[in-house]
Amino acid sequence: MNETLKVMEARRSCRNFDKKKMVSAEDIEAIVKAGTYAPTGRGKQSPIIIAVTNKELRDQIATENAKIMGTDMDPFYGAPVILIVLADKTIPTYKYDGSLVMGNLMNAAESLGLGSIWIHRAKEEFESDFGKKILSDLGIDGDYEGIGHCAIGYAAVPAPASAPRKGNYVYYVK
């Protein structure tokens, strides 16, 4: 089987990251680059990616995300790197574009032997003063909506086997 298809079949959401092991800058850059090659409507490239490796900011984002979720747990499961995908709301396909970026990020992480998980609530985070300040501090202007957080790191435990695919997943018309 083709290596790309193997990666897609093997990828699982990681909910237990090794908190002591940081992802290399080279691997982060490769994953982010893969995200930038996701297809976008009319080639508009509406998404942006904020790669957070600074532990202080990562922990602040985790705290804000947990508040939105209504808990005090770490919503990123200890992952040391958070790749935040936002997309320009003025582009009609922005949600789809951002979702495709998220998929590329997760598959790229898997291809490099890293765990990943899509964590929601980026929309609410970046509608808040907290998120708006992050964008402002980075000099990001525009009408962006948070699509998701791709938490990445080394898995602390092996990924579980995939669940069987449901019987009525695909319908062929020949």
Image: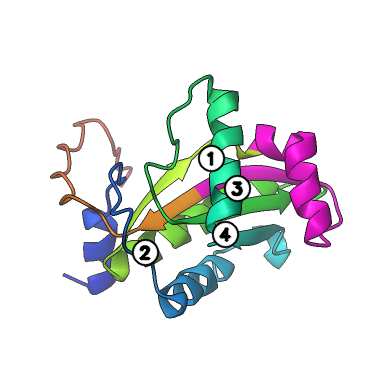
* Residue drawn at (74%, 39%) of the image: 130
Q: Position of residue 134 (x, y in %)?
A: 74, 51
Which residue is tagged 3? 96
Q: Which mark is residue 62?
A: 1
Residue 143, magenta (yes or no): yes
Which is more N-terminal, label 3 or label 2?
Answer: 3
Q: Which mark is residue 52?
A: 4
* Residue drawn at (83%, 54%) of the image: 136
Q: Is 75 positioned to the left or the right of 3 in the image?
A: right
The reply to whether callout 2 and callout 3 are in contact (CB within 8 Å) is no
The answer for how far apart the CA atoms under marks 4 and 2 are is 15 Å
Which is more N-terminal, label 3 or label 4?
Answer: 4
Q: Amino acid at mark 3?
A: Tyr
Check disc 3: other Cα within 10 Å, few if <14, some if 14-19, many if 20+.
some
The secondary structure type at the circle numbered 3 is: helix
Q: Amino acid at mark 2?
A: Ala
Q: Which mark is residue 136?
A: none
* Residue drawn at (48%, 40%) of the image: 119
Which is more N-terminal, label 3 or label 1?
Answer: 1
The secondary structure type at the circle numbered 4 is: strand
Which is more N-terminal, label 2 or label 4?
Answer: 4
Which residue is tagged 2? 109
Residue farthest along the top direction in this orientation: 70
Residue 61, magenta (yes or no): no
Which is more N-terminal, label 4 or label 1?
Answer: 4
* Camera-nearest label, 4 or 2: 4
Q: Amino acid at mark 4?
A: Val
